[in-house]
Every structure is written in C-alpha cells, then in structure tokens.
Image: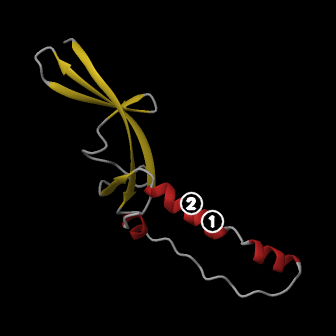
Amino acid sequence: MSEIAATTVHEAYAFACMKCGYGWEQSYEIEHHVDVHGHPFVVYTADGRRVPSPLSTPTCANCGGHVVRIMRAGRVAGVQELLRRSRTPSAAETVAKDRTVPTAAAPARHWRLSDLFHRG
C-alpha cells in the first residue's frame, strides 16, 4: 500500500499518572497521511521511533498505569521548576547561615499532584 505524505506537525504534551503521581513531558512529530484510497491516517513518532498515539491509551513509564491525565506542555516542567526553586536557599538565608545567625525556618512547600491541574 503506498501513501502520500500530507503534513508533519510538532506537538508536546505533559502527563501525570493518577495512580503513582509520576509526571513527564514528551514531544511528538505527527505525520498526517492519506492512503491510496483517500483515507487519512496519522503516524506519531517520539525520539525518532514510531509510537502509539499518546491520546489513545497513555501508559505511565513509572508504574504501567493507564489512568493518566494529559495536559498542555510545560505543566510538569513548571512544577519541577517551582520545586527546584523552593529547595534553593534565598540570599538572605545564605548570608545568615554564613554569619551563624539563627534564622526562622522557611515554610515547607509541598508539591501535590493537584498542583498540575491549576490553570496557569
């Protein structure tokens, strides 16, 4: 069966497993084709390999679960950046620590899976 390539688009999605809480992001090349009978079909590739559509039955790479929330790209990276920043001491804390002056403990920032679902 021969085909005619129509267009290729690039899309990225963020995913969060509702079973274990694992989050990840993936970019895809989506090739839109039309077969010789005029029927459209789509081929997804990620990292140069053909993969199933991430929208049909996403699978968690951490636990194998199939209850996965699909979001726009950047949601997981955004939460990971917040976590990274919350672990970095502020300049005032660093100066205070260097002078051995006791400082009040900063409030802990807890990350919850629900943090991914708030629209940004």
Which residue is labeled 1 in the image? 85
Picture coordinates of residue 58, whole percent (x, y): 31, 48
Which residue is labeled 2 in the image? 81
Q: Are marks 2 and 1 in contact (CB under 8 Å)?
A: yes
Residue at the limit of the structure toward the top, as seen here: 2
Q: Amino acid at mark 1?
A: Arg
- For mark 1, does the 10 Å Cα neighbourhood hold few (<14), some (14 to 19), or many (20 or more) residues? few
Quadrant of the rendered structure where residue 22 is? bottom left
Image height of 100 relative to 25, above or below: below
Residue 45 is left or right of residue 84, and the answer is left
Residue 8 is left or right of residue 101, and the answer is left
Picture coordinates of residue 27, whole percent (x, y): 42, 40
Name the residue located 46 percent from the left edge and 32 percent from the top edge: 47
> Which element is circle 1 on?
helix
Q: Amino acid at mark 2?
A: Glu
Quadrant of the rendered structure where residue 30 is? top left
Name the residue located 34 percent from the left edge and 32 percent from the top edge: 9
Quadrant location, the C terminus: bottom left
Q: CA distance from mark 2 to mark 1?
A: 6 Å
Quadrant location, the N terminus: top left
Image height of 22 relative to 8, above or below: below
Quadrant of the rendered structure where residue 54 is? top left
Image height of 62 relative to 55, above or below: below
